[in-house]
Image (cartoon, grey):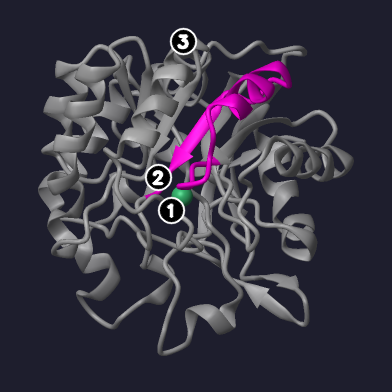
Amino acid sequence: MNSITLKNPFDMHLHLREGEILKAVLPFSAQSFSGGVIMPNLKTPVTTSQLAQSYREEIASLAPDFLALMTIYVTDFLDKESLQDLSEVGIKILKLYPKGATTNSDSGVSSILNPNLLEILKVAQDLGMILSIHGESDGFSMDREYEFLKVFENLAKRFPKLHIVLEHMSDHRSIKVLENFENITATLTYHHITMDLDSLLGKNLNPHYFCKPILKTPYDKEALLDLALNAHKKVSFGSDSAPHLISNKYSQNAFGGIFSAPNLLPRLVELFERHNKLENLQAFVSDNAITNYKIKVKKDKFITLKKSPSKIPDSIPVLDSKIIPLFGGSDLMWQELV
Ligand SMILES: [Zn+2]
């Protein structure tokens, strides 16, 4: 096959940041995707309807056709009265970070199963909202997602009608939980289905491959890749593209986050083609998300990719500095027609 057309691709886990970084990174997602789930861990976390609406407006002023599905950062101070207001303005995704689990997550909840939060989740369930979770314990890095699975099981049983999303699944042991509970779905990144821990530190340490949850074993990678290639109904693509200025990557305190937004679709086409699964790509990057999140697409977007060499940019200039994309400077076999 020499060309492929994808209808309404969605990126169901996306960090766009704010201000100048937003301006620099948003065009990559807006060019390729109809929309995406926008993560709320800004410097001032998006914790209220007002903050989410002004962030949505900031995004819309730069990319009017991009459907930004906003999320609200769950803190210990979220009250159930505000959930009603959120659903009235079309914000229906709550994002839960355990305190300190990743970039700007210091406002996260200190104890997931506290009575206040459980009451909020009950209201969220009644309103048909979605609970999206960065599920990691504070244990050993390679076991954090696994150790957190019991929280997913607990919540899924307690709130059987609440749609719960296991974000950026990275551990093969999570697949059983995904399959056991009807109300749990998951997102998969490009990096967790194509790379393992050795990509990060098998040779020299590569800070651009450092992310949370951390890349895991080859076995995990293969098991998750298999879900993606077969477009498992409960799995959607969510890049978790997370840009950081180079100074925050090359420091003693390197931030976790992989900036994968540039050229995501050409890379996914290459990957699915290599495994003879191109026919499943449409479901993985769009159909599953539209069904599972009940997305109402206002205007269809078609992206055609053609087999023709292209290159990932070396770096993206921003704020007198730069951001390095995943595989910056490397060649691709496909390109998007714009
Ligand atoms: Zn993320």
Choose between 318 and 272: the one closer to the eye: 318
Q: Secondary structure at mark 1?
A: loop
Residue 193 position, x and y percent, is: 29, 44
Magenta span: 73-97
Q: Residues within 10 Å of mark 1 (few under 14, many from 20)?
A: many
Q: Residue at x 43, y 79 (%)?
A: 254
Residue 138 position, x and y percent, is: 22, 61
Residue at label 3?
A: 126
Are circles 1 and 3 on residues that touch, CB within 8 Å? Answer: no
The answer to whether residue 53 shows anywhere in this view is: yes
Labels in figure, total: 3
Q: Which mark is residue 108?
A: 1
Q: Sequence order check: which comes first, mark 1 or mark 3?
A: 1
Image vertical order of residue 279 relative to residue 9, above or below: above
Q: Is residue 82 magenta?
A: yes
**Amino acid type of the residue tagged 3 in the rendering:** Asp
Q: Residue at x 73, y 21 (%)?
A: 89
Point out the frontmost of discs 2 and 3.
3
Q: Residues within 10 Å of mark 2 (few under 14, many from 20)?
A: many
Q: Secondary structure at mark 2?
A: helix
Image vertical order of residue 205 relative to residue 288, above or below: below
Residue at label 2?
A: 190
Q: Residue at x 47, y 34 (%)?
A: 269
**Amino acid type of the residue tagged 1 in the rendering:** Gly
Q: Residue at x 45, y 63 (%)?
A: 106
